Image: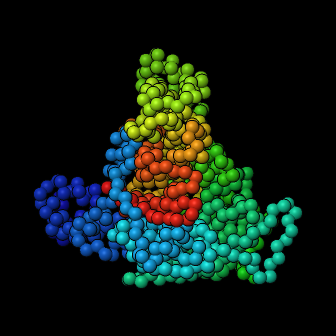
């Protein structure tokens, strides 16, 4: 049917396909393959343009591309990333994802200052531009030809304490919110506290950058000074229209940088303290232990004397709408037992009703929930009686096998013990593919992987569909629950395995995890890894995935299974000696839609360098 259309219409149709669909179309017949090859530049350029929009990539990152192969390679980065992730996950040997790693070289005239003063990095979605921050300035580098770098913008800033928030808006504007070193504002005298908690001052600046041709344009949107108790700080941020929202110890502060006005409130009702905030033009929305809650923005008022005092008498606003999780979670930011916060890729994008809001809740695995799923697995697998008996004994003993001998295990003995126990423990906990196994050149003492629920973490994914016509008719559904297993003996997975963030990648989400632990039998060497997980963003009905089961909760199907963790950088496997003095990976980012990552290395002497990792 497509070949029956005029040639120009054939091109228009093909230009609206994604990269995978174009590849499939090329395989259908020789005529269509010729059409695509003859108009390849137009087709792949259009494909890349839509790819940038779909994944919120910085479009100027690709302004230098000219050839068909350039456009094609950029538009297929997510396919390369997904293929590399699948291959690494399927190998079962826990090798790092296929990659090319280079150490970034800075220009000689900037090298001494840059090398010693990088505190944070930000890889702009698109993979070409890298921000580096120090106490007095930030730099923008073109790293298209890594390891070579070109300084394209430098901007002095008064004492950057840390970068609180970065976001790319409409494929062309970069927003930065950072805190600067500040003193008490003129006219304010700190009070002697009655409760022993002194006040402190936090000053934030909001900046917008865009690339106009070859020049970077920087627009300073304002400065906001907040006086608050020193025992709390901003836990979460959101941005909508001209408003920056900060969540500080349960208090929401909204600042309009256009009118220089503000408002502050607490979420009312019988709910726990919020841990995440997102918004649209009319509502601020929260994630709490219990679920999602929304309130209307109250009236804004002028900022007098150039600062705001976060008072104890902040108004309490009851939620206009609320939707509950399937269970009450423990997301207390003060807890050190689990990773704090729910998190997602869209907290700084408007929740407008056109697309669902996806977020993950990370929670220590529940024995009760694990036992329910265990009964299903035993029935489905039709296990022989002696295996069922071994599983029951394993569970009765507190999901534990006998502790290893005090003396160190040789690598051979360690593997023999692991093979013997792995089958029973993997069935008991649902982890049919136990990852995180030591490399073949490991010797001496080693903390072998644990599949106990005490050492496992559940990642629950929720889909919030906002109804702008009537928010009370919005929906909140749990769409997947996956289990991640840590290695080593620590019983609190949140102390070992935690996620930096996750982002969209052409219909999937990619999460960057950091695993960091001390071996109980090795007090010097630190085992550190950066890990990647990749999963589909469920925006519609959920078919059961191969190798995974489904379970029904509140009438909704929930995908169950193991969270496949693939090493991006595993220092233990590579033989690095990580000590308390460093070097160790600091700030790190992955941009899956450009198949690129950056890792900032530092040590106690503040000497830093940056590795660029291209996924192949």
In this view of the protein, which residue sits in the foreground, 366 or 600? 600
Residue 308 at x, y = what percent? 74, 74
Q: Residue at x 42, y 29 (%)?
A: 412
In which quadrant is the N terminus drawn?
Answer: bottom left
Q: Is residue 499 visible from the viewing direction of this image?
A: yes
Colouring scheme applied when the structure was drawn = rainbow
> Total marks drawn?
0
Residue 488 at x, y = what percent? 54, 38
Residue 280 at x, y = what percent? 57, 66
Q: Residue at x 60, y 46 (%)?
A: 495
Q: Is residue 467 visible from the viewing direction of this image?
A: no
Identify whether 539 is placed above or below 608.
above
Q: On the rendered structure, is 504 left or right of 350?
A: left
Q: Residue at x 57, y 63 (%)?
A: 605
Residue 469 at x, y = what percent? 55, 63
Q: Residue at x 72, y 61 (%)?
A: 232
What residue occupies the far left of the structure in this picture? 30
In this view of the protein, which residue sits in the foreground, 547 or 60? 60
In which quadrant is the C terminus drawn?
Answer: bottom left
In this view of the protein, which residue sits in the foreground, 98 or 297? 98
Q: On the rendered structure, is 274 left or right of 478?
A: right
């Amino acid at each position: 049917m497509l070949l029956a259309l005029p040639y120009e219409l054939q091109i228009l149709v093909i230009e609206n396909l994604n990269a995978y669909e174009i590849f499939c179309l090329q395989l259908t017949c020789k005529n269509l393959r010729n059409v695509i090859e003859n108009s390849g530049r137009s087709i792949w350029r259009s494909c890349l343009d839509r790819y940038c929009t779909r994944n919120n990539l910085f479009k100027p990152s690709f302004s230098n591309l000219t050839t068909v192969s350039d456009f094609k390679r950029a538009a297929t980065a997510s396919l390369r990333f997904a293929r590399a992730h699948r291959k690494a996950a399927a190998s079962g040997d826990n090798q790092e994802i296929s990659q090319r790693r280079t150490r970034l070289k800075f220009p000689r005239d900037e090298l001494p200052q840059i090398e010693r003063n990088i505190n944070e990095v930000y890889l702009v979605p698109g993979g070409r531009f890298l921000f580096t921050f120090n106490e007095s300035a930030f730099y923008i580098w073109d790293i298209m030809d890594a390891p070579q770098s070109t300084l394209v913008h430098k901007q002095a800033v008064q004492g950057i304490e840390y970068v609180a928030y970065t976001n790319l808006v409409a494929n062309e504007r970069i927003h930065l919110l950072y805190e600067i070193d500040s003193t008490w504002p003129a006219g304010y005298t700190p009070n002697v506290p009655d409760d022993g908690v002194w006040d402190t001052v936090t000053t934030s600046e909001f900046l917008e950058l865009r690339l106009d041709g070859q020049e970077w344009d920087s627009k300073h949107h304002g400065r906001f000074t907040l006086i608050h108790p020193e025992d709390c700080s901003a836990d979460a941020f959101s941005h909508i229209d001209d408003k920056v929202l900060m969540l500080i110890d349960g208090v929401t502060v909204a600042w309009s940088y256009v009118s220089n006005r503000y408002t502050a409130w607490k979420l009312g009702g019988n709910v726990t303290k919020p841990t995440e905030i997102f918004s649209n033009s009319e509502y601020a929305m929260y994630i709490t232990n219990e679920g999602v809650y929304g309130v209307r923005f109250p009236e804004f008022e002028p900022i007098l004397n150039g600062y705001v005092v976060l008072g104890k008498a902040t108004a309490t606003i009851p939620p206009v709408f609320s939707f509950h999780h399937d269970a009450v979670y423990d997301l207390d930011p003060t807890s050190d037992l689990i990773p704090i916060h729910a998190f997602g890729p869209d907290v700084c994008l408007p929740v407008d009703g056109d697309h669902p809001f996806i977020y993950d809740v990370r929670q220590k695995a529940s024995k009760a929930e694990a036992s329910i799923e265990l009964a299903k697995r035993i029935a489905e697998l039709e296990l022989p009686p002696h295996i069922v008996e071994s599983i029951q004994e394993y569970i009765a003993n507190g999901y534990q096998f006998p502790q290893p001998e005090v003396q160190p295990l040789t690598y051979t003995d360690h593997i023999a013990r692991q093979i013997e126990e792995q089958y029973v423990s993997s069935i008991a906990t649902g982890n049919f593919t136990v990852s995180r196994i030591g490399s073949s050149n490991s010797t001496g003492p080693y903390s072998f992987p644990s599949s106990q629920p005490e050492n496992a973490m559940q990642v629950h994914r929720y889909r919030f569909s906002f109804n702008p016509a009537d928010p009370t008719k919005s929906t909140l559904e749990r769409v997947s629950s996956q289990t991640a297993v840590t290695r080593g003996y620590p019983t609190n997975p949140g102390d070992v395995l935690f996620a930096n963030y996750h982002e969209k990648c052409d219909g999937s989400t990619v999460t960057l995890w950091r695993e960091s632990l001390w071996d109980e039998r090795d007090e010097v060497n630190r085992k550190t890894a950066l890990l990647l997980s990749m999963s589909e963003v469920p925006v519609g009905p959920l078919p059961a995935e191969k190798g995974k089961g489904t379970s029904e909760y509140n009438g909704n199907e929930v995908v169950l299974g193991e969270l496949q963790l693939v090493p991006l950088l595993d220092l233990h496997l590579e033989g690095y000696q990580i000590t308390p003095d460093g070097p160790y990976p600091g700030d790190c980012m992955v941009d899956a839609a450009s198949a690129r990552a950056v890792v900032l290395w530092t040590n106690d002497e503040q000497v830093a360098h940056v590795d660029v990792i291209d996924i192949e």
